[in-house]
Image (spheres, rainbow, N blue to C red):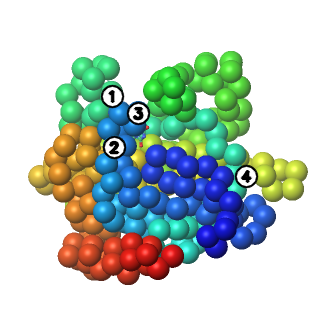
Amino acid sequence: MSRRRKIYEGKAKILYEGPEPGTIIQYFKDDATAFNAEKHAVLDGKGVLNNRLSEFFMTRLAGIGVPTHFLKRINMREQLVKKVDIIPLEVVVRNVAAGSISKRLGIPEGESLPRSLVEFYYKKDELGDPMVSEEHIAAFNWASPQEMDDMVSTALRVNDFLAGLFSAVGIRLVDMKLEFGRLYEGDTVRTVLADEISPDSCRLWDLETNEKLDKDRFRRDMGGVTEAYAEVATRLGIIKQTSDLATVVDINGERSGAK
Ligand code: UDP
């Protein structure tokens, strides 16, 4: 296993060649970055929690018929996924104003939006992932009209489903970022949900107190980042209680040098 080939190392994940052709292993690191990697930290146990949380969301979404790249979780930090070509766009869905839309349009953080908004950002680190319009996407051929349709309708469906799932456990889904990939099957190609869904890529606020339970705790130096992720996992019934975090991390062999 340790001899397997690394395909790509990103800010929070490493991708390795999978055991079968057409598969990839996603390894979740503890690294956290923000502001285009200007800010960096290692947060003990974050990777373990994001692996579990992303497995949970992808499995639930597959259950309602959303096509995803997810196959199975392998261990505490790794999951097996189908190999896809990532479409070079970040698809952001927003329900409540926060972050860049508040800054750009002067809408106070926390104000509900009149309807769920879908935005596109071009994935290009050197440019800081600029926001782009459908015109740009069509002109530069980053995604086909069919893929755009698939991404928008799936993003809204994912948003409705996850907003309900979160609200049942007292959490508001403020916004989230999704990524999609092209899955080649014979001579057909399908658009599937890829990458990860976790508190690294969503804004999650406690419904009653508005306490932040997501990566903004890291971006804004609020502390308690992993504890907040563990709180989300606890409320969703993925781990037993917040104090379980130690156990979740401890039984991961890699931290004790077992792998
Ligand atoms: N987001 C992300 N990766 C990025 C940029 C944004 O996962 O590279 C997520 C972010 O966590 C939030 C949503 O997308 O849930 C909207 O982010 P926003 O545009 O407000 O940007 P930010 O304020 O994070 O710079």
Answer few, some or many: residues within 10 Å of disc 4's Cα (few below 14, many 20 plus, some between 14 and 19): many
Between label 3 and label 2, give the one nearer the viewer: 2
Q: Are marks 3 and 2 in contact (CB under 8 Å)?
A: no
Residue 202 can be seen in this image: no
The disc at residue 90 is none
Between label 1 and label 3, give the one nearer the viewer: 3
Q: Between residues 212 and 149, which one lies in front from this camera angle?
A: 212
Q: Between residues 152 and 247, which one lies in front from this camera angle?
A: 247
Amino acid, disc 2: His
Amino acid, disc 4: Leu
Q: Earlier in the sequence, mark 4 or mark 3?
A: 3
Residue of label 1: 100
Answer few, some or many: residues within 10 Å of disc 2's Cα (few below 14, many 20 plus, some between 14 and 19): some
Q: Between residues 157 and 243, which one lies in front from this camera angle?
A: 243
Does label 3 point to a residue whose CB lies under 8 Å from ligand 1? yes
Image quadrant assignment for residue 105: top left
Does label 1 point to a residue whose CB lies under 8 Å from ligand 1? yes
Between label 4 and label 3, give the one nearer the viewer: 3
- Left or right: where does residue 212 sit relative to residue 56? left
Vertical arrangement, residue 144 with respect to residue 46, above or below: above
- Left or right: where does residue 94 sit relative to residue 55? left
Between label 2 and label 4, give the one nearer the viewer: 2
The disc at residue 183 is 4
Q: Earlier in the sequence, mark 2 or mark 1?
A: 2
Label 2 and label 1: CA atoms lie apart by 20 Å
